[in-house]
Image (cartoon, rainbow, N blue to C red):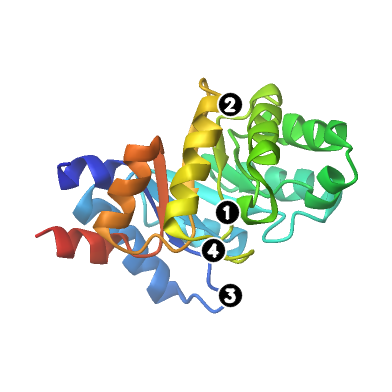
Amino acid sequence: MDKKQVAAAIDSTNLKANASEADIIKLCAEVHVYGFRGICINLGRLQFAGGQLLGKKIAVVVDFPLGAGGIAAKMNQTIIAVSNGADEIDPVINLGAFRDKRPGVIKYEISAINKILPAKVIIETGYWNDREIAELAKLVADSGAMAVKTSTGMGPPVSLDDKARHVEIMKKAAPGLLVKAAGDIKTLTDAVKMINAGADIIGTSSGAAMMTEAN
């Protein structure tokens, strides 16, 4: 697979709590150098990043990383995001609601915020079995979101083989939905593995290293 194809799928990511302005400048510069799809950052760095990045997607995480803030947190953060120039959001589902067998809560929250900004919805696959992953992918699709995303990178560890299988499950369960693979995708080989499994978007903090590796 051509490295340009991989680059075009990458949401170059920095979600570190201590990310500095210099880190964000570097992140944005790499998007232009390597032709990445865009960036994914914390909400607090959105205004600063907007001045550094033109013509590429800016996504911010919402109710991250726990997804437990409820509709008020998700709505407030999404409104701030759209007001400050975000193109997309990566919200975490209400994980507890799914355990409580209350899918309507998840659908309500995601539907509401997706009306404001296109959502790539994180379901944190490490918590769920294959049947539950498929159920969640369908639920995200029914909520009108643009994509379903594997993980925050901060939840239960998932091997690359299992992550690729999760991508396949989500793609099969909701074929009209984009799939974003994220979490411990560190090398070009890792990214290609996810794309071959069906991922449309790759979330990684190692994009520049991948492109250097590809050379």
Q: Tell me the SS state at disc 2.
A: helix
Q: On the image, which quarter does residue 4 sit in?
A: top left
* Horizontal and vertical percent position of residue 169: 54, 35
Give the CA distance from mark 4 to mark 1: 21 Å
Mark number displayed over residue 45? 4
Quadrant housing residue 147: top right
Q: Residue type at mark 2?
A: Ala
- Badge 4 marks a residue whose secondary structure is helix
* Mark 3 lies on residue: 17
User: Can the viewer see residue 55?
Assistant: no
Chain-order first, disc 1 or disc 3: 3
- Does residue 97 appear to the left or right of 88 in the view shown? right
Which amino acid, by three-letter code, is at mark 3? Ala
The residue where tag 2 is placed is 173
Q: Mark 4 vs mark 2: which is more N-terminal? A: 4
Q: Is residue 149 above or below residue 15?
A: above
At label 3, counting other C-alpha atoms closer than 10 Å, the crowd grade (few under 14, some 14-19, many 20 or more) is few
Residue at the disc numbered 1 = 151
